[in-house]
Image (tube, rainbow, N blue to C red):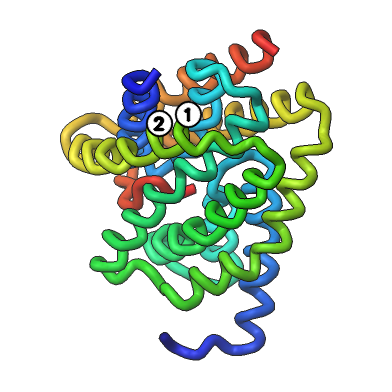
Amino acid sequence: MPRVSRNRRLELLGIGTAAGVFSGLFGVGGGTVMVPLLILWLGYDERTATGTSLAAIVVISAIGATTQAFYGNLHVDDGLLVGIPAIGGVLLGTWLQQRVSMRVISGLFALLLTALAVDLVVTS
Amino acid sequence: MIVEAALIGVAAGAVSGMLGVGGGILFVPALVLVLNLSQVEGEATSLLAILPVAAVGTWSQRRYGNVRLAEGFLMGTLAAAGTIGGVALVNVLPAHVVKVAFAVLLLFTAFQMVRRALAPDVPPARDGAGS
């Protein structure tokens, strides 16, 4: 692995900290925070930013899940039952991506997210 | 319950793969609304569910030369204090505040998707399970 300069370490600390807080608060990986910052601040291209953020997410989600386990909130069985089949889902999605209209899918997904947002708040 | 959980995983993974959004944005509401976890339990469990997806995503993207592994792992490790702080924070916030905040994140992501749908040219997302 290449050496990482001190300056770059500080930049990665800043981006990582922001992503970590976001990840811990929302239970997501933090790519929403990391990808644009890696592009705008560190000059990554989009693919490299996304790929590199995935490597960071492996570490962030492991630390976050472990911390949540100490709080007694982690359902290990549900997490594995959802997470392992999701690998197959990603492969399916990547395959479908070449074959369906992303415009339509993006629009439908926006509708779904809006419905979920309403549902979450209403059922609370 | 097992079938439902597996279907959630496949569906959320497929959306991730197609649109390049993270699995967590779908794992959390699915765990809360379908498997009846509390909001904080859903968020905790989503973090575990993300892990295998991100690991496989890293491995496959690395073959395309899209991963700066040293910087990615370093960034994740340096994120530890923030991550632990975020988890600590979500555990002391009132449950309804956490839910509303998550709903805002869902709406923000929906807005991004609408913008993408209306964009003149939709660039294919290549990542899968980005955030």
Q: Nearer the viewer, residue B48 or A71?
A: A71
Q: Quadrant of the C terminus of chain A?
A: top right
Quarter of the picture containing the N terminus of chain A is bottom left
Mark 2 closeness class: few <14, some 14–19, many ≥20 residues within 10 Å: many
Give the alpha-carbon distance from disc 1 to disc 2, as whole Å.
5 Å
Is residue B115 among the parts visible in the rendering? no
Q: Residue at x 33, y 30 (%)?
A: A103
Subunit of label 1: B
Q: Chain of mark 2?
A: B
Measured along the vertical axis of the image, is residue A89 above or below residue A4? above
A109 with respect to A34 (left or right): left
**What kind of element bears circle 1?**
helix
Residue positioned 66% across, 63% down in the render: B80
Residue B114 has which mark? 1
User: Residue extending furthest top?
Assistant: A122
**1 and 2 marks in contact (CB < 8 Å):** yes
Callout 1 and callout 2 share a chain: yes
Identify the residue under disc 2: B117
Q: Is residue B129 above or below residue B28?
A: below
> In the picture shown, does residue B126 fall above or below A94?
below
> What amino acid is at disc 2?
Ala
- In the rendering, at what x and y percent does residue B2 appear? 36, 22
Relative vertical location of residue B42 with respect to residue B70 in this rendering, above or below: above
On screen, residue A62 versus residue B12, left or right, reads right
In the image, residue A62 lies at what x, y percent?
53, 55
